[in-house]
Image: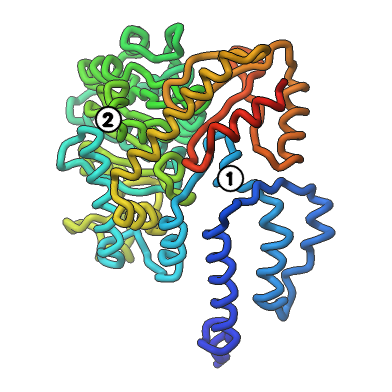
Amino acid sequence: MTAPADMHRISPDTTRTVDDVLDYARRRALYQDIPLDKPMTPRELQRLASGSITPDGIGARRAIALFENVLAPACVSTDHPGYLSFIPSAPSRASLAFDLVVSASAIYGGSWMEGAGAVYAENEVLHWLAREFGLPETAGGVFVQGGTVGNLSALVTARDAARRRLVDEGRPAPARWVVVCSAEAHSSIASAAAVMDVDIAPAAVDSDGRLRADAVARALDAHGDAVFAVVATAGTTNFGIVDDIAGVGAVAKERGVWFHVDGAYGLAAMLVERMRPAFAGVELADSVIVDPHKWLFAPFDACALIYREPALALSAHTQKAEYLDTLTGKPDWNPSDLAVQLTRRARGLPLWFSLATHGTAQYRAAIEYGIDLARRIADEIEGRDGLSLVRDPQLSVVVFRRDGWSLADYAAWSEHLLEEQLAFVVPSSHAGEPVLRFAIISPLTTFELLTEILDTLA
């Protein structure tokens, strides 16, 4: 019989490997000046980084050096204060450090039997969020990979619940199931619908870009029992717009249709007291998501998926297999029974550790900082010649234009900004018009940095 591979033995080489990795991780986590960095071409990386996979290995020290000096600098740092594109990430130092612990602990987070302590801690966070959102004490859920998986899992549960209800009532299922959502809903809703082979009925938004009750009512009238879910967005990705959640939720409840709130980016703002009225109606949701790796300062990848009635998710998602018999049919809380996954990392633990370390008050203050900074830089944009706001910010996304510029102008400016390592700001678009967009998440992003970026547009 072949002896165990050396890579699993505790040896001086293993100790040095662990020390080298932890040393780099410590330095990266404690950077005072986070590097922005920029992508390299495939040809450049082929020249600088090829040949690392060999029969005998290149050793930990060379591998770490290759990553630190070549591969990492070819990745834009999403936690850089000048990373203002898409939706940035700004994990706390505590959450970054504890992410290492999660990996080092080899915890399986799919079942209570194997990961009770980790699941309990994750549930502490989920229950706190559920209370903040006004959901009942019986609400619960699971941390999944991201908003796309969260939305898909919620919609799978919604369809299963609708199908079971029709069976109980002795009615046939529709030829095609339908999801009603805003025309401005995140692309992951359409992606989930494609995976599920169901149709999307996009409801028109009002002049402010918000989905409202009347548009949803018309869609429900048009599609009837084929509609198994209505989706409202708590902070659109492009503009940060919050739908009329209360109105949409009331219509969905009146018609007996599952109500899902996609709050992947924006729902974290509900933790700020003065912002809570904007999210009125979330308490009506049958399911809701929010991504901690966005505005709750956790590392990639984590989405909190919460159900009003978790038992409905169990019915939809619990996998059946002989080797799983010991887990199923028990009252234990098994996270893998609540979403489209089986194997799962305990990805909620870094957020749990950071919350437990810093307290919720610091989280509320950090989120409020982003909202205030967005308002302040929006006012600055309005006061500058040649710049104009596309829409007043509601959360922490500021969309504006440089008067007279084309998409090519924006793209050239964006490339120059990254080349100078000042910031990462890519163009977006609205109603066919190219625009610029600041997505402010990091508490390290300053008004001075944003004005310096604006100065380059002069």
- Give residue 9's mark: none
Q: Is residue 266 above or below residue 360?
A: above
Is residue 197 in view?
no
Q: Quadrant of residue 426?
A: top right
Q: Quadrant of residue 325?
A: bottom left
- Give residue 80's mark: 1
Q: Is residue 295 above or below residue 205?
A: below
Give the camera-side residue of 29 and 171.
29
At 28% from the left edge and 58% from the top edge, which residue is drawn? 119
Give the camera-side residue of 189 and 168.
189
Residue holding disc 2: 273
Number of callouts:
2
- In the rendered image, the quadrant that contains the N terminus is bottom right
In this picture, residue 153 sits left or right of residue 70: left
Q: Secondary structure at mark 2?
A: helix
In this picture, residue 193 sits left or right of residue 163: right
Q: In the rendered structure, which amino acid carries the disc numbered 2? A: Glu
Give the camera-side residue of 142 and 323.
142
